[in-house]
Amino acid sequence: MDPRKRGKEFINNHIYGDLKGLKPSQLKQLQRLYHQRLPGDRLTTPEFAQRLAAISTDLGKPLSAYLNRRGQVIRVGVGSPRQTQIPPLELPRYGASRLSGIRCIATQLKRNPPGTSTLTAMAIQRLDALICLTLTGSGFQRRGGGETGYVHTAYLAHLVPNSKEAAWTLSEDMTLEAIAQQDFLDLVEALEGEFEREFVGQSVDSDGDRVLLVGLRTQNVSEADFQEHLAEVVRLVDTAGGVVLQTIQQGRSRPHPQTVIGSGKVDELALAVQTVGANLVVFDRDLSPAQVRNLEKRLGVRVVDRTEVILDIFAQRAQSRAGKLQVELAQLEYSLPRLTGQGQNMSRLGGGIGTRGPGETQLETERRAISQRLSRLQREVTNLQAHRARMRQQRQAQEVPSIALVGYTNAGKSTLLNVLANSDIYTADQLFATLDPTTRRLSIQEDVTHVVHNLVLTDTVGFIHELPPALVDAFRATLEEVTEADALLHLVDLSHGAWQNQIHSVMGILSEMPITPGPILLVFNKIDQVDGDTLELAKEEYPQATFISATAGFGLATLRQRLLQLVDYTKH
Ligand SMILES: Nc1nc2c(ncn2[C@@H]2O[C@H](COP(=O)(O)OP(=O)(O)OP(=O)(O)O)[C@@H](O)[C@H]2O)c(=O)[nH]1
Ligand SMILES: [Mg+2]
């Protein structure tokens, strides 16, 4: 339990940091620091500073002491502020408009001003202030008790409001007496007033998540693709209702096994979390349960991956009973192996050594409950699948050919279906506007013969690059519409910068489907938003394709005839 919360009845005497080679008497001296109480309105007293410096000189090691605003010592560590810092999860959470209410008094062996790593540690913890003491190397015990002469000079540092980057001020070297005379409460009150004003000025819509996005660029990815990919995650976050305040990028040959990004980068991230007041960190890739745990421990805020953002959008979008069912299934499938981070060790549940104990039982119960719900949902999805199959059979019995509309999310699939079938399915400039497949009947008159043909067109859930496997599985009932259709219309948003990548993503996902779809008609949409060069390029690369604008109505007559040809082709 957190000793600070226990009040007076519990005296913490744990010494943090590197205790190697410490004699019992030295440990005692350190522990006694917890009995010291400073006046609430002083940064430090000369006595406390000298005592810390004396022990530090004796140990030949730097020391850090942390105090709360009541002047109580709440943490003593051997090492620099960087080495002894309080884990973010143990810090009080006041948000970006306030300081943590904790200050640090540290000694250092070198006589130069505190370096960046020390100041960064201050910023990550949002310390009220940091006092760095340099040492003379000797000193003595005064006759009346208490040490003196150990402190050479002192530096005072604290944060200053700046919404863009971590900012602090660092004093010139001062005498210990000068620092001890400073009114501490005046200082923090003035500072917090400024933080408050700054924060109110910059605060965005307070309901949504305030997000820091982290992108890792591995070797085989081009800079342009990487930026496209990041931009897409920004849109996903936005669609889910969050705001990306800042993006942090790193290039690495491969992800760090524990933290995805390197350790120094995690510090930078922790600092940015504090500076911009983020409450959520989103990674541009999937994370292992252990990585999430490690990162949350060091950042002090929730960490989610790209799949979770997509699942969240789906959860918000799901309207129909079937849609909700499939989303819940996907979420459970995603979270089950993450429950303990021991997905691979599940076989140990059979019993035996190492499987018992209250923790494990609790988890097992939870897991069993989830498993049961999972199989129920899976049964329901299977029923759904059977129901859809019957509907399809009916259509096939009536010999109405079916075409499924597929494509990258936001390509304009629902808009096109609306124009062609004169319907009003929900469309929006959002990712994953459609979750439920909607089928509409079209009647098209053949140009030459004037014969009217019927066919059905089904709108489907949009695809995305690296579609999370949990989603593919949960939406198999929906996606079966695709695999069972007589033909596919693959719609592409030609006005999107990454249209070529999007074509490849969609073709990739289609090729992984169990049943090979029939013929595919490639249709480029949004040509009203496209410049001549892009149009030329696409026509050159895909001479068989059809070019339309669903909203401006370009090319629709041609498209209707192409649909008839497509269906004719499937009949014979
Ligand atoms: N400029 C332009 N915008 C279009 C055109 N067709 C569709 N849009 C817009 O593109 C956005 C996405 O359209 P939707 O029909 O919702 O796209 P979708 O493919 O169904 O997307 P999801 O259901 O999210 O996968 C909407 O804002 C449409 O108004 C077009 O031809 N030109
Ligand atoms: Mg749609």
Image: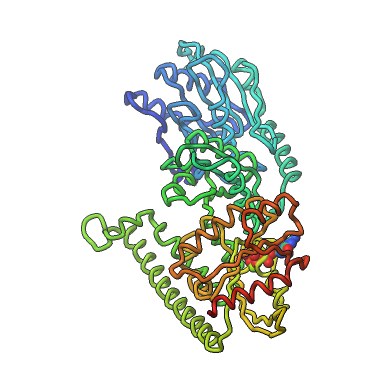
Considering depth in this image, is 393 or 131 the residue closer to the camera? 393
Considering depth in this image, is 33 or 460 the residue closer to the camera? 460
Please indicate, yes or no, whether residue 433 appears anywhere in the rendered image: no
Residue in the picture at 56% in, 48% down: 281
**From the viewer's perspective, is 460 left or right of 539?**
left
Give the tally of numbered discs: 0
Please indicate, yes or no, whether residue 135 appears anywhere in the rendered image: yes
**From the viewer's perspective, is 240 left or right of 144?**
right
Splitting the image into four quadrants, where does ligand 1 fall? bottom right
Q: Quadrant of residue 430?
A: bottom right
Residue in the picture at 49% in, 39% down: 219
Q: In this picture, is 118 found above or below 286?
A: above
Residue in the picture at 28% in, 60% down: 347
Considering depth in this image, is 523 or 505 the residue closer to the camera? 523
Percent from the top left, x then y, of residue 351? 23, 62
Residue in the picture at 62% in, 26% down: 157
